[in-house]
Amino acid sequence: MPATALVTGGNRGIGLGITRRLLQDGWAVSILATRPAPEDVLGELRELAGDEARVRYVQGSVAEPVDHERYVQDAVDAWGRLDLLVNNAGVAPSVRADILEAGTESFDRVLGINLRGPYFLTQRFAQEVIRLRGPLSALPEPPAGPVATVVNVSSISATTVSVNRGDYCISKAGVGMATQLWAARLAPEGVVVYEVRPGVIATDMTAGVTEKYDAVFAGGSVPIARWGRPSDVAGAVAILASGQTPYSTGEVFHVDGGMHIPTL
């Protein structure tokens, strides 16, 4: 069985780019998404994989722990192993609102999906990895590299303020701390944890603010002055998932064209 990956929101946008790249690299991939199974997308992915057994789809929400259980168990039942979790699924506020006026409903929704969901899915994934592997002390010799990897997809908004979507910024900043927490806790278990922090990526989430970000790029405030692509983020995930950085954990990998660099 090839190495296996769970990719939340892996059916569209950045997540779809990640799914495609992992399949190209030989992984088996299971997608968790709220929509009914998109047969057109799944057909394309199965063709890319060359083996329909390497592509699975579970309908559910990352915000619901009961769906975490179904999602993890489905992969274990199908493949008998867990190697990678990519916490990608996320939402923007339904309506951008000044933080002086924003309400609790949007806040609770955004943090439930973007922060609480991945936090507890990581917990469930790690518990199952440990159960499948058994105690490290019981192994005949220490593993040569990580036994599993978690990659959290956050956002430049973890450190860049947007006062009309404070809930989103707080959720992504929280993902940054969750990455550090899980990195510290899971290192003794042989599991490494990373954060990939995209900048402005061309997806349906950013389609409504095209003019705004076109102006940002034209103004020279981003060193690599173009829109990012889902494949750019997927490349970073592929590197971190490859096992080539076994002595690193808790790291942040920016995929933002240098947007995070302070400039004068």
Image: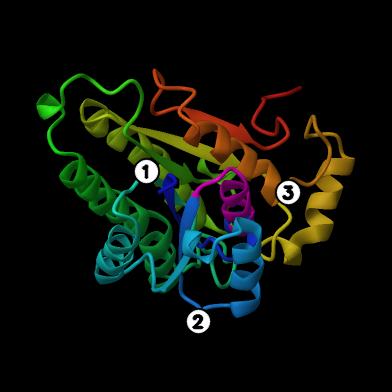
**Residue linked to disc 2:** 36
The crowding category of the residue bearing disc 3, from other C-alpha atoms within 10 Å (few below 14, some 14 to 19, many at least 20), is some
Q: Spatial distance from mark 3 to mark 2, Cα to Cα?
A: 25 Å
Q: Position of residue 31 (x, y in %)?
A: 47, 63
Kindly identify the amino acid type of the residue bearing the numbered disc 2: Pro
Label whose residue precedes the other's in the sequence (3 or 2): 2
Residue contact between numbered discs 3 and 2, judged by CB atoms under 8 Å: no
Left or right of 124 in this view: 131: left
Write the residue at 36% across / 54% down. Answer: 118
Name the secondary structure under disc 2.
loop
Q: Nearer the viewer, mark 1 or mark 3?
A: 1
Horizontally, is 94 left or right of 246 in the view? Answer: right
Compared across the picture, whether 199 is left or right of 105 comes to right
Q: Closer to us: mark 1 or mark 2?
A: 1
Q: Quadrant of the C terminus?
A: top right
Does residue 240 appear left or right of residue 115 in this picture?
right
The magenta region covers 16-27
- Residue at image x 50%, y 30%? 252
Res. 167 visible in picture: no
Circle 1 sits on which residue? 83
Q: Earlier in the sequence, mark 1 or mark 3?
A: 1
Q: Nearer the viewer, mark 3 or mark 2?
A: 2
Residue ranking furthest to the right: 218
Residues at marks 1 and 2, CA–CA distance in whole angstroms: 25 Å
Nearer the N terminus, badge 1 or badge 2?
Answer: 2
Which residue is labeled 3 in the image?
A: 229
Image vertical order of residue 162 relative to residue 102, above or below: above
- The dominant secondary structure in magenta is helix
